[in-house]
Amino acid sequence: MSERHWGPADRESALAAVKGRSEPWDLIIAGGGITGAGVAREAARAGLNVLLVERQDFSWGTSSRSSKMVHGGLRYIAQGDIRTTMHSVHERERLMREAPGLVDLMPYMMPHYKGRFPGPFLFGMLLRVYDFLAGKRYRRFWSAEKILSRFPFLRQEGLRGVTEFADAVTDDSRLVMRVLHEACSDGAVALNYTAVCAMQQDASGASVVLSDQESGEEFTVQARAVVNATGVWANTLREGQTSELQTIRPARGSHILIPAERLPVDVSFTVLHPRDQRPIFVYPWLGRTVIGTTDLDTPMPGNEEIGITRDEVDYLYELSEFQFPGLGLSDADVISTWAGIRPLVSSGASDSSGEKRDHTVWKDGRLISVSGGKLTTFRLIALDVLDAAKEWLADGTLFNDDAPVFAASSSLSAHPDPALWKRLSGHYGEAVAEQICTDTTYGADVIEGTGTLWAELAWCARNEAIVHLDDLLLRRTRVGLLGTNGGLVDIPRLHALAQKELGWDEDRWLSELERYQSLHSRYYALPEA
C-alpha cells in the first residue's frame, strides 16, 4: 500500500511533483469515485503512468452516498437482460471472495401479500435463474407463520409468506479507498481537491488545466488520453470536445438511519411502497438500520452538497408505518441522513426509476467519458473504458481482464475479536488492520455509538489524504453518520487527535469544526418539518 502522497504534510510535495513533471501522463483520470478508482487500478496494474484527480474529496459524490449494496442485478432478469445479470452476479461473488469484511453476503427478504405483485411463484422463478448464474442456491421460502415468529413487527394482513434470496452489502466509501490504495501501490498518483478546469487535444496529445481547489492555483499537465469519470457532471468536460452530448438524468436517492433497537432487522427487507409500488430497502448497516432509497428526478447539481428533502423523509416514514405497523418513527429516532445523485443515462423513461442502470462509454478523440453503471460492476466498467482508450496508449499495453481487484494477503494470527478483525481487515487490508489493533496510543477504545476505534480514526488521519474534518468523519470513517450529534460525542479528544495526527493549530481546528457542524446540520441531519 502506497502512502507517500497521502500523509498530512505530503499534499504540497505531491502537487509540486505533478506541476514539475515534463513527460506526459499516459492517463489522467478526472473523478475520484468508484469508477475513476477502478480505472486507475486497472491502468496502473498494466504499467501506465496514471494521475487521478478529484475536485472534491475521494468518493465525495455518489460513491459515498449509495445504498451500500453490491447487487447481482436481479431486476435485469425481469427485463430479459441475462447477460448484464450474469456479469453482475459474477462480480458480486468475486468481491465477496476477495474482500470479506468489506463486501459481505446479506440475506434479502421479499414479503408477498395477497393481490400484490410479485407473487412467490413468479419471484421464485426469477431467483432460480439468479442462483443458477451465481452457481449457488440462496433462495428459500418462509411461511407467514414462521416469518412472523422471527419478525413479529412485520405487516401481517394478507401476508402469504416471504422469499429469501441474497446479495451483498459494503461500505461504499471504504471500497473506493481500498481500490485507490491498490492503484497507488502500483504507481498511480491520486490527488483530492484538484479539479480539471479545461482540456485541449490535438494529434500529439492532450493538454489539461488543473486547479488546486485549496489555493486556487491553476497549472497545466500533458497526457496521452483523459478519462472523464465525473458521473453526473460528465457533460461538463465533454462540452467543447463534441456537439453530440448525451442527456444525463440526475436522480436523487435519499436514506434515513435509525437505531437498530427501533427496528431490529438482521436481513434486508425489500418492500413495496404503498403509494407507488417502488421497492424500498430496510436493512442493517454497521450496527444501525437504514431505510431507503427514494428515486426522484432532481436538478443538475453544482459543486455543492445535497441533502434529503422533507417530502422524502415523510415518504420513508409512510413506508415504514405501512410495512411495520405501530412502529411510529418520528424525527427523534433519526440519527442521520444522506442523499446521493445517480448519473443515469437518459433513454426517455417516464420517471427515473424506469431508466436502466447500465453504463455508457463515449469516445471524443483522446477524451474517454463514462457515466451510469452499477457499483457492483466497477471493474468491468474500468476495462471497457480502457479498451476505448487503447489507441492512444503505447503499443502492447495489456489489461488483465481476470486479475483480482485486491492483492492477496497472507493470513495473520487469529484476533481475539473475530468480527472486529474481519471488519478492519476488509476495510483497510490485513497489514493496516494489524497496525490499528496493536496501536498503543489509542488502544481499543471505541467512539461511542459507532463501533469505530479511535485508533482507526487516527490511522486514517495519518495516511489517507485528509484535508477537511468531513473527509475523516463522513468518508474515511462513518463516525459522522453512525454517531449522535454528527459523531461529535467527545470533541476534546477529537481536537487532540486532529492536533497530533493532522498538525492543526487552534485556528485551523475551530475553522474545521465550524465547517463540519454547518455541513452536517444542512445535509446529513433532518430538514426542518
Image (cartoon, helix red, strand yellow):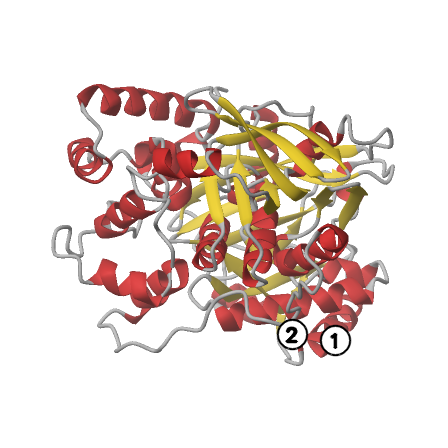
Q: Secondary structure at mark 2?
A: loop
Q: Is residue 517 left or right of residue 364?
A: left
Q: Secondary structure at mark 1?
A: helix
Question: Looking at this view, is 7 or 85 the one in front?
Answer: 7
Mark 1 belongs to which amino acid?
A: Arg
For the point 27% across and 51% down, the residue is 456
User: Where residue 240 sits in the image (x, y, percent)?
Assistant: 77, 26
Task: State the residue position of label 2.
Answer: 139
Q: Which circle's residue, 2 or 1, is located before the other in the chain?
A: 1
User: Where residue 86 sits in the image (x, y, percent)?
Assistant: 74, 69
User: Where residue 193 sits in the image (x, y, percent)?
Assistant: 47, 31
Question: Looking at this view, is 81 or 22 the one in front?
Answer: 22
Q: Of all residues shown, which one is farthest toward the left?
A: 440
- Residue 128, label in figure: 1
**Does the image show residue 96?**
yes
Asked if residue 418 is positioned above or below residue 329 in the image, the reply reads below
Q: Is residue 17 left or right of residue 147?
A: left
Q: Quadrant of the rendered structure where residue 254 is?
A: top right
Question: Looking at this view, is 70 or 309 the one in front?
Answer: 70
Q: Residues within 10 Å of mark 2 (few under 14, many from 20)?
A: some
For the point 31% across and 20% down, the residue is 514
Q: Is residue 475 left or right of residue 447?
A: right
User: Where residue 341 sits in the image (x, y, percent)?
Assistant: 63, 35
Q: Residues within 10 Å of mark 1 (few under 14, many from 20)?
A: some
Q: CA distance from mark 2 to mark 1?
A: 8 Å
Quadrant showing the N terminus: bottom left
- Residue 315, label in figure: none
For the point 77% across and 53% down, the residue is 391
Q: Quadrant of the rendered structure where residue 472 is?
A: top left
**Does the image show residue 333?**
no
Circles 2 and 1, Cβ within 8 Å, touching? The answer is: yes
Mark 2 belongs to which amino acid?
A: Arg
